[in-house]
Image (tube, grey):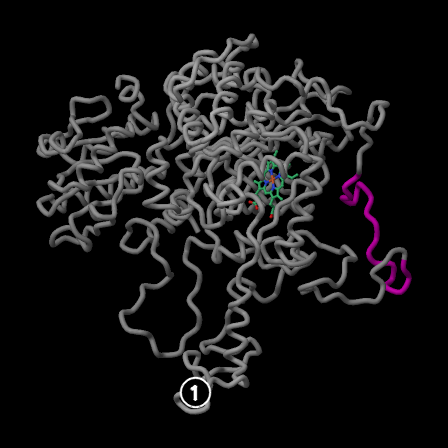
Amino acid sequence: MSKNDRASSQPNGQAPGVPQSEPASFAEPTSPRPPLPPKPDQRTPADVSPTGCPFQIPLGGDGQQGEFQTTAQGTRVPTTDRSLKAGPRGPVLLQDHHLREKITHFDHERIPERVVHARGAGAHGVFRANGAASSLSRAQVFAEGEETEVFVRFSTVLGSRGSADTVRDTRGFATKFYTAEGVWDLVGNNIPVFFIQDGIKFPDVIHAGKPHPDREIPQAQSAHDTFWDFVTLHTEATHHTIWNMSDRGIPRSYRMMEGFGVNTFRFFNAAGESSLVKFHWKPRLGVHSLVWEEAQIAGGVDPDFHRRDLADAIEAGAFPEWDLGVQVFPDTEDQMFQGIDLLDPTKIVPEELVPVQIIGTMTLNANPTNFFEETEQVAFHPGHLPPGIDVTADPLLQGRLFSYLDTQISRLGGPNFSQLPINRPHAPVNDMFRDGMHQVGKHAGVAPYRPNSLDGGNPFIATEEQGARIDVPVPILETTITREQAVSFDDHYSQARLFYLSLSEVEQRHVTNAYTFELGKCYEQSIKERAVGVLAHIDQGLANTVADGLGLPHPEPQDTAEVTPSPALSQVGQKWPVQGRQLGILTTENSDPAAVAELVAAAFAADLVPLVIGESGGTLGESEVPISRTYTTARSVEFDAVVVADAPDLPEARVLLDEVFRHNKAAAVLSAAAAKAAELGLSTSGPGVVEIDTLAQAVEALDPLLATHRVWERELGA
Ligand code: HEM
């Protein structure tokens, strides 16, 4: 379905978010009919069998069939509301199988949440390769013009499944490519480095970041003593920590995040030549963030902020896109590049030294049909690799290679989770694995072993020409068994400093505020003192300002590294497309419906998502312009910019406009409403607030302001 078909499939052509493919009737329907189809924006996992074969019978929606409710055994039931009883006043009889089956199934509806990255949102899409990587990797997924279906899951790391989306945290960015040569999972984050250099420390960093074990607070945040205790005693975490304290820790949207493979991987081409690579996802919409106050407000007013944003954008046809790129390094014996150890996951290689080469583009174009079946049950693994992509000896990656499969066996209830529809490869599977809990494969034959003669020798072993994933020999230097790590892993501070010095003034200010907030939430004085001591290794000014905020003495100055800033690390200073940005339109019952309708149409035409805010629900006045939000349900965090057609004298309108101003958002104010807007806190004399004579001018007036994401001058001038 094309983007335009989707946009026009919106009920009323208005804001996305309706719950079903058909409007609900007022009274409970009573005529039998088949189950409703998925909505136009939704897709189910592909119609393939557990072994990757295309199904004759479409699989989508096969979880339910027929007009009538049945038991799990397919027998129709006359009621599902009343238990079988000895007389109208009971007692309830044990022989009511439907009752016991229904309650038993319900009792087991939940599965364990992921130990990390429990909170997430998913989407289907497609990856198109441009061929630029085909000389580096023999993987078919990179062949020019090759299209591969994907499923992506974005996540936070620390929070439980029901926690808020907008907390300060790293975001997961995991992509499953259903390639013709088997599944490839690129399991990355929105931050290019990690807290630890060795997988054996993963339980420690997660125990420190999760809620305290005695009271189980705080939920989904790092602003507490155990996190800061760990990252300040364990200074290899310094670089990842400063990224979390920067605006990267509070993305505006999953659609506006970079993604990184973090660990270095290895490519092999058809000639067997290897290179080392780092993966980068570059969002076409640019990298944008919330401001901290917005993140906190959204945690309360809309804990599903990122999840909703992704689903609504896809439903509205504003399909998010990312270019996939690689930084390529020679596969030298020491696996270093200009003094940077490529096996140390706390280090980046600045893009100015090694540019990111774009090798394809991913478009997310469908929402899941069922969250549990798809987003919850999807299982990623950094070791799911087709021929042409391989791992390196990065000790963090090696730990990951063990961990994911192991945890999924308990999370997904046994060893057969690759047979769940969302996890099925789109390539033939003949693995000789048999039995186990929840086996759904229909295996024929008697000889699941090799060699055999009873099943005609099947399955056979493929050669490299027949597509086998060959283990290309990688030399290992002569060495001894040890628990030591390379000396090159000992530099914990220089790249944290590089990151800080690469940020613009406003971004540095946010970093300072974030450290001051987070450490201000700690109880232990010694941990705070230790933390500002660590900051002195990054930048003395940063350390001193945070110390001032905490009421601590300035730390001892430290020798800091000479670094060359990397402008690519800053999020400020460029212009980006405005597609999918949310426009709030403030109205009252006095607003001209025809002019507002024209503005809504112009906003849709510019690929913006207009949301009309009115004094009460329904439509604007006598017109057909639907009110998407009222002053009771609207909050500024939802909008990237606003148009003030008129504003009521309500406290909620005052809060809204005040936040629009304080959060550096662009606004267009109709001249006739300028005095009212100023009275409510949004003056047209401030930067980024433009006065317009007619609503028809609003989209054009806001476009250049939206393109820079926010009106940063307002914050710097403040
Ligand atoms: C480069 C560092 C790492 C990155 C980028 C990363 C990324 C991710 C992502 C994106 C997920 C969520 C997957 C999903 O959406 O289902 C995840 C889950 C997980 N990660 Fe990592 N991770 C890293 C390091 C580690 C390490 C060192 C370990 C253990 C040694 C680990 C263990 C896990 C586990 C157990 C899960 C839950 C998997 C599941 O239940 O399906 N991760 N990780």
Q: Where is 166 relative to 544, above or below?
A: below
Q: Residues within 10 Å of mark 1 (few under 14, many from 20)?
A: few
Q: Residue at x 34, y 78 (%)?
A: 30
Residue 317 in view:
no
Which span is picked out in magenta?
452-470
Which image quarter has ligand 1?
A: top right
Q: Is residue 583 left or right of residue 310?
A: left
**Which residue does the numbered mark 1 point to in the structure image?**
90
Is ligand 1 closer than 8 angstroms to the Cβ of mark 1?
no
Q: Does the magenta run of residues contain 165?
A: no
Q: Residue at x 85, y 58 (%)?
A: 449
Callout 1 amino acid? Gly
Q: Residue at x 58, y 31 (%)?
A: 359
Return the residue nearer the eye: 150 or 213: 213
Q: Is residue 248 left or right of residue 179?
A: left
Q: Where is 10 relative to 516, above or below?
A: below
Q: Does the magenta run of residues contain 469?
A: yes
